[in-house]
Amino acid sequence: MNEINYEQTGYVVKAEDSVGTALGEIHRGLIHMRGKGTEGLPDICAAVDIPFGHKFAVRDIAAGAPIIKYGVIIATAVKDIRVGEHVHLHNVRSNFDMRAATYDQETADSTDMEYEVY
């Protein structure tokens, strides 16, 4: 049996999904696609490094369009996202937690709160 190398591997659950999930660290270059949702999808080339567990676009997503994962709308694009780009806090707004739009993309700290050190 062939062992799966999860580095450079992405997974798409449903054909209507606009994003895949990185099953390992993905670096610029070809992503080996797996999952039922990959039928009919062309090979995808990562435009940037994508951390393990993060999402990437499997098709172009226009600003204002829904981000679909598991066949469900999970967020809205706040700017155009091209195939192979990282999909995360810097280019989406959560449809469930409006405060997620104010999170710092590096630390995930909310930028609309003041913090005090005690």
Image (tube, rainbow, N blue to C red):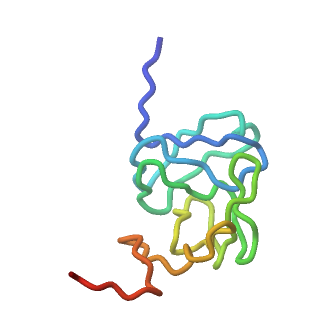
Relative height, residue 13 to residue 104 (above, below): above
Residue 101, x across and y down, in percent: 56, 78
In the picture provided, is 96 more to the left or to the right than 108? Answer: right
Residue visible at 52% across and 45% down? 31
54 and 117: which is toward the camera? 117
Q: Residue furthest left?
A: 118
Give the left or right position of residue 117, taking residue 9 as reference: left
Say which residue appears at 74% left-offset and 59% top-offset. 73
Which residue does the image show at 50% across and 47% down from the upper left? 22
Question: Which image quadrant for residue 104?
Answer: bottom left
Quadrant in the picture for residue 83? bottom right
- Total number of numbered labels? 0
Work out whether residue 13 or residue 108 is closer to the camera in this orientation and state it: 108
Q: Which residue is most to the front? A: 118
Task: Give the percent coordinates (x, y) of residue 55.
Answer: 55, 55
Q: Locate residue 43: give its quadrant.
A: top right
Residue 108, how many percent across, how many down? 41, 70
Which quadrant is home to the C terminus?
bottom left
Q: Residue at x 60, y 35 (%)?
A: 34
Vertical placement of residue 52 versus 66, above or below: above
> Vertical placement of 66 versus 1: above or below?
below
